[in-house]
Image: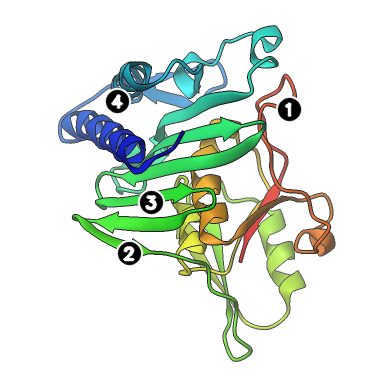
């Protein structure tokens, strides 16, 4: 299903959504509050409509977007393949105007993210991952293959942490690693992409996320050769028995805690 032409078309949709976001980013905008107290801007909605309209022209698969998530489980539970979309991940970073926000489009196949594009319009970075084909990063038209990098014996641990949602358990995790650690603060799904491209070794997420926050970036990480595993016990998170994070397995769209690793 995912030939190069279709991948390129979906990348183009993500860029078009990014253009919509940037039009609003560069002027004054209002901020509303959703029922869960999270912020919502007109950029979230503009990107949502751009992506949904674009995907519907390419595919008849159902779409689950953060901005149209009220789809009953009785319907979602029948989906084998669907598009999972976060039109603007990192709304808090968007409001702060620090550039660390992304457009995210993933294809989920029987619970597994098999394709993802993560586009950071301010940074002009696009991460693309296709299961079985690898992952790459586009920067101003230049394409570069990416892969995670294992920690070397003489290196300190490079660990990604959230810029806006820091968890008190992070310090406990850092202490458990042993040796020197360097915490890299980053917003949105870019945190997973830093591991995918070898700029960090680990990203422990010990706080709440939703499936649309992670689907596209997990596809990039796994296509690049990395892992996104469910965290029940930190000691087991990087074992060969750790379970991969999966999607649309239950009514709740909340993810368990997870670890992104090489």
Residue denoted by label 4 = 43
Quadrant location of the C terminus? Answer: bottom right
Q: Nearer the viewer, mark 1 or mark 4?
A: 1
For marks 3 and 2, the one nearer the N-term is 3
The percent coordinates of residue 253 (x first, y second) are: 65, 26
Q: Residue at x 51, y 28 (%)?
A: 84
The percent coordinates of residue 29 (x first, y second) are: 23, 25
For marks 2 and 1, the one nearer the N-term is 2
Tell me the CA gap for discs 4 and 3: 21 Å
Q: Residue at x 48, y 69 (%)?
A: 198
Residue denoted by label 3 = 127
Cβ–Cβ below 8 Å for labels 1 and 3?
A: no
For marks 4 and 3, the one nearer the N-term is 4
Cβ–Cβ below 8 Å for labels 2 and 1?
A: no
Q: Is residue 161 visible?
A: yes
Q: Residue at x 46, y 28 (%)?
A: 85
Residue 249's disc is 1
Residue denoted by label 2 = 144
Q: Nearer the viewer, mark 3 or mark 2?
A: 2
Q: Residue at x 51, y 16 (%)?
A: 62
Cβ–Cβ below 8 Å for labels 4 and 3?
A: no
Q: Nearer the viewer, mark 2 or mark 1?
A: 2
């Amino acid at each position: 299903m995912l030939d190069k032409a279709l991948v390129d078309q979906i990348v183009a949709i993500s860029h078009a959504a990014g253009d919509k976001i940037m039009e609003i980013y560069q002027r004054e905008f209002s901020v509303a509050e959703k029922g869960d107290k999270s912020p919502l801007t007109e950029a979230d909605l503009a990107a949502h409509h751009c992506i949904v309209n674009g995907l519907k022209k390419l595919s008849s698969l159902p779409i689950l977007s953060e901005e149209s998530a009220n789809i009953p489980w009785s319907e979602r539970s029948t989906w084998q393949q669907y598009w999972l979309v976060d039109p603007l991940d990192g709304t808090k970073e968007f409001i702060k105007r620090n550039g660390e926000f992304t457009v995210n489009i993933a294809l989920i196949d029987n619970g597994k993210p098999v394709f993802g594009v993560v586009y950071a319009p301010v940074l002009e970075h696009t991460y693309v991952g296709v299961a079985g084909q690898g992952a790459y990063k586009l920067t101003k038209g230049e394409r570069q293959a990416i892969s995670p990098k294992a920690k070397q014996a003489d290196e300190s641990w490079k660990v990604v942490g959230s810029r806006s949602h820091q968890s008190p358990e992070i310090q406990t995790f850092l202490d458990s690693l042993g040796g020197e650690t360097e915490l890299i603060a980053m917003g949105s799904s870019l945190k997973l992409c830093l591991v995918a491209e070898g700029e960090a070794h680990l990203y422990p997420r010990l706080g709440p996320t939703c499936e649309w926050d992670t689907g596209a970036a997990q596809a990039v990480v796994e296509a690049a050769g990395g892992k996104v595993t469910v965290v029940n016990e930190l000691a087991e998170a990087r074992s060969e028995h750790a379970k991969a994070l999966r999607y649309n397995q239950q009514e709740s769209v909340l993810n368990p805690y997870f670890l992104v690793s090489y």
